[in-house]
Image (cartoon, helix red, strand yellow):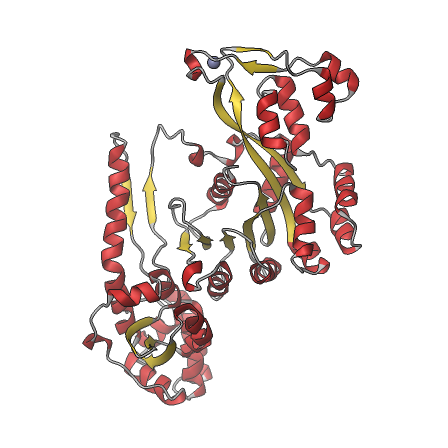
Amino acid sequence: MPIQLDTTSEQNILNMLMDQSVISTEQMTKIKAMSKEIGKSRLETAFELNLTDEKKIIEILSKAYSLDTVDLKKYKINDKLKKIVPLDYIRNNTLVPFEMANGILKIAIPDASKLSLMKNLKTMTKMDPELYAATISDIGDFITRMSGGEDKLRQGQKLEQVKKKEKIVPIEVESDVINFGDKVIGEAIDMEASDIRDKELNELGFEAHDLKKLIKAVTSPQGMVLVTGPTGSGKTTTLYSILKHINKPSMNILTAEDPVEYELEGIGQVHVREDIGYTFASALRSFLRQDPEVILVGEIRDKDTVDIALKAALTGHLVFSTIHTNDAPSTITRLQNMGTPNYLISAALSLIMAQRLARKTCSECKIIDENATPKLLNSIGFLPEQSARAKIYKGKGCDHCNKSGYKGRMGVYEILEVTKELKQGILSNLGQNELEALAKKGGFKTMHSMGHDLLLSGDLSFAEYERILSRG
Ligand SMILES: [Zn+2]
């Protein structure tokens, strides 16, 4: 079999074969045991045991669901169809659009679990989908051919990018066109990588107790972790570092992004296309059929997405996402305002992190900033005696920092762990200020407070503090 179906599809076919008495309960028990023994999927095992074959499956599928059959070998790859149904969607759901005319889109499917996608396909393509039964191999072959050009292009680009660095980088790229073609397993070890996107979780500047909370949340088997901050605050960097931290070869991690910022090794990444109706919510729905351990949803913008994401987080999935809010405590209010019930927020949400990206003051040319007066410091929340003593620095500008006064970047964070007390508070419908006060009692430190520490340590200038933290 050139294609491996996702487990839902396989199980669907096996159930159908049992319903039609092609496979008996005893034979199914034998299949399960032998599948484990020989390390092949259950359906492959049924083939090995000669209990069924592809011809039989398509015959039963077409009869049981009144579907016409199609011989995909007679059809050529049509690039127009790829524009209507994105390749990622095709691979993700193992189906093949093969012809369109007069508002009708003909789609070949290998099993009946795809019948539930009719509505989704109709919304996405604005055409009437008509389903046909095709053999598993023909569908696999067709998807591989459809993917062919694109994969070569992608790998070509990838190798090109590596070459551009003009360094010797060992690279190994293996495209894995299974039910999830974008899952490119590649390895590029660059000894000099210093790009911020390659940062390890412990290099992002978290304080030890915050890092501990973060690691606890991101290594839990389920729950939702939200990262919030304006554009350019490094949310993607943080999320990618988290994914890299928890990723293991045995783990199924799927991401829906808009756009995919860069490829992550061993992680299935899907580019969301809202323009053609392939939304974060529809990506999430198709992900759940594959039962991944970890899901990253690029952004929560609507109630539909938040509902599915929270439910996923309650049913054995670890869900990461971003949301547009000013800080961590207001994120809870935001979810409530989107119409999410308190019990769902309280049960599913495990941690919220808010962040800003600040320019670090150049250590070679820093001087005392006379403009950062005690009065100004009071206005941003310093205590009077602290303001009187505080020495605030700024970069004067030197050759080391290209006369800018800044050298490097650093994250300014707040990490809100949704503790038992906070969950109770959410259930009791406490307001934002009350929730924040409750969190502070439990050790929550705000971004402003971290900003104050960085002002006092001389790493953050007053101007930069104002730029990143004055709003909200
Ligand atoms: Zn300097």
Image position, residue 308 (x, y; %): 57, 62
| Quarter of the figure with residue 44 | bottom left
Seen in the image, is 161 located left or right of residue 261? left
Q: Report the residue at 63% width, 41% height from top.
A: 326
Q: Looking at the image, is 396 positioned above or below residue 103?
A: above
The answer to whether any part of residue 387 appears in the image is: yes
Image position, residue 160 (x, y; %): 24, 40
* Count of marks overlaid on the render: 0
Image position, residue 335 (x, y; %): 65, 54
| Quarter of the figure with residue 135 | bottom left
| Quarter of the figure with residue 30 | bottom left
- Which image quadrant: the C terminus? top right
Q: Looking at the image, is 324 positioned above or below residue 150?
A: above
The answer to whether any part of residue 30 appears in the image is: no
Image position, residue 263 (x, y; %): 37, 46
- Which image quadrant: the N terminus? bottom left
Seen in the image, is 15 located left or right of residue 215? left
Q: Report the residue at 75% width, 52% height from top.
A: 426
The residue lying toward the viewer, choosing from 390 and 244, is 390
Q: Looking at the image, is 183 positioned above or below residue 56?
A: above
Q: Report the residue at 28% width, 40% height from top.
A: 171
The residue lying toward the viewer, choosing from 58 and 418, is 418
Q: Report the residue at 44% width, 62% height from top.
A: 278
